[in-house]
Amino acid sequence: MRPMLAVVVVAAVLGMVKAYTIFQASLPKVAAERLVREQVAGDYSIELTLTFDAMPDEFSFEPVSLMVKQDGHDKPLLKRTDKVEANAPVVIDRVETFLEGTNEFTVEAFPGAEDIDRPHAVRVRVLRGNRIIVEKSLWSRGGEPINDVVAFDIAEASDSTPAHAHE
Amino acid sequence: MYRTLVFLFLFVFLLPARADQEEPQRVLVSSTTQTADFARQVVGDRWEVKCILAPGQDPHLYEIKPGDAKLVAQADLCVQNGWHLEGKEWMKTLATNAGKPLVTCVDGLEPLELHEEGVVVYDPHAWFSTINAAKYVQNIVHGVSQIDPENKDEYIARGELYVNQLRALHSWIKLQVNAVPTHQRVLVTSHDAFGYFCSQYGFTARAPAGWSTGAEAGGGVTPERLERAFQAVRESGVKAVFVETSVNPKLIREMAANAGIRVGGELYSDSMGGPGTAGESYIGMMRENVLLIVNALK
């Protein structure tokens, strides 16, 4: 009696699972919404000005002094492994990867291992042609590298609607 | 009847869960407590990290035990410090005998050369430089990524987070050490283990015993070294000398008594602290050492 009951229970459970999968498969398919963001036209550039000399970082796995990476891109927009002088603007020209909507890039800048006594800053400006569309200062405490995000919106792909930065 | 039903339900519902379980953990066997800590920071829960040396044990004098070969036989990867910290190359011997891959953490580092008894030896205590510690981590990331390339990105991410902590530690040490007047920055310890620390943070190192507590060239206590250490104590006017957790404190205590100065405390040197102590991690060990040194010498 008991083995028979066991077989019946197992068959019932498996049957219910099968019935559920059949029911799931019979449901109408909903087409996924396609989210395509247009690449924006225009002559975009990023300008970075450091308050300190950035040095190749002795702690990092790669000796980077200054790096800028855009969201979703493995290849950095800028990767410097040499000394970057303070107060000398570094410009990344012709940034062609900005998209309509929210854009984001990270800035990493490394003070030397001996430079620990003062806070550091990088002024970041995003320009379209000669017009500044975003300006932001990124700060770190003494001795720490700057590692921060600049996020901003570009309203439409083709027009010159001003962007606004996220706080 | 009721029991049969319960059994059947458990059988039916637990069987798939068993099949979904993750693959077994890989095993990493490390020679020293420091390298084991670095490895744990990199591998997370993906690997089981085992350490041959117990907290407080001296790697220079360690003799291989029967259980060690068994431990290494389970390993997917072995990790050692290198530059003869492991006296008579005991970790290399274990790994080679078991046919296991071995990561040597000092690979690629700039050694501190010690000219002793007509020979040049590389000071193996390189982890006392926080910058070198970051390179240890990098070598371990490289080693585990070769064994488990699928999770390489994860090991790199953990390693990068940890070296950020090392960078913060470095800045903190610099600021702490600033409280000690430069002419009082003489670090007298049982054996010559703090060369990299002293070089990075502006101290002069003195010790009655050489780079090793063993009998290798440049190791052990010699009359010349003893005299140099005494001279450093007399001339610098240091307020304290330090014993080490993994070395017999007798000589330093005698030295302090003879010079009429105090023993500043017990530094973690070739081995970290046991579970539950402040020195059970590398960062904790460095923090406690620095606090002890600064408070005793300032």
Image: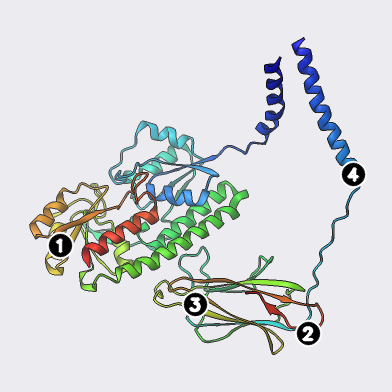
Residue beneath disc 4: A27
Residue beneath disc 1: B228
**Can residue A13 be spotted in the picture?**
yes
What x and y, as percent, mark residue B209?
20, 53
Q: Say what secondary structure mark 3 lies in.
A: loop
* The disc label shown at residue A54, or none: 3
Colouring scheme, one of rainbow, by chain, secondary structure, one colour = rainbow
Disc 4: CA contacts within 10 A as few (<14), some (14-19) or many (>=20): few
Please give the chain letter of the residue carrying mark 4: A
Dots 2, 4 in contact, CB < 8 A: no
Q: Nearer the viewer, mark 2 or mark 3?
A: 2
What x and y, as percent, mark residue A73?
68, 66
Disc 1: CA contacts within 10 A as few (<14), some (14-19) or many (>=20): some
Whole-angstrom CA distance, mark 1 to mark 2, is 74 Å
Give above or below for B270 relative to A26.
below
Disc 2: CA contacts within 10 A as few (<14), some (14-19) or many (>=20): few
Give above or below for B25 relative to A30.
above
Whole-angstrom CA distance, mark 4 to mark 3, is 59 Å
Residue beneath disc 2: A160
Q: In the image, what residue type sits under mark 1?
A: Arg
Q: Nearer the viewer, mark 4 or mark 1?
A: 4
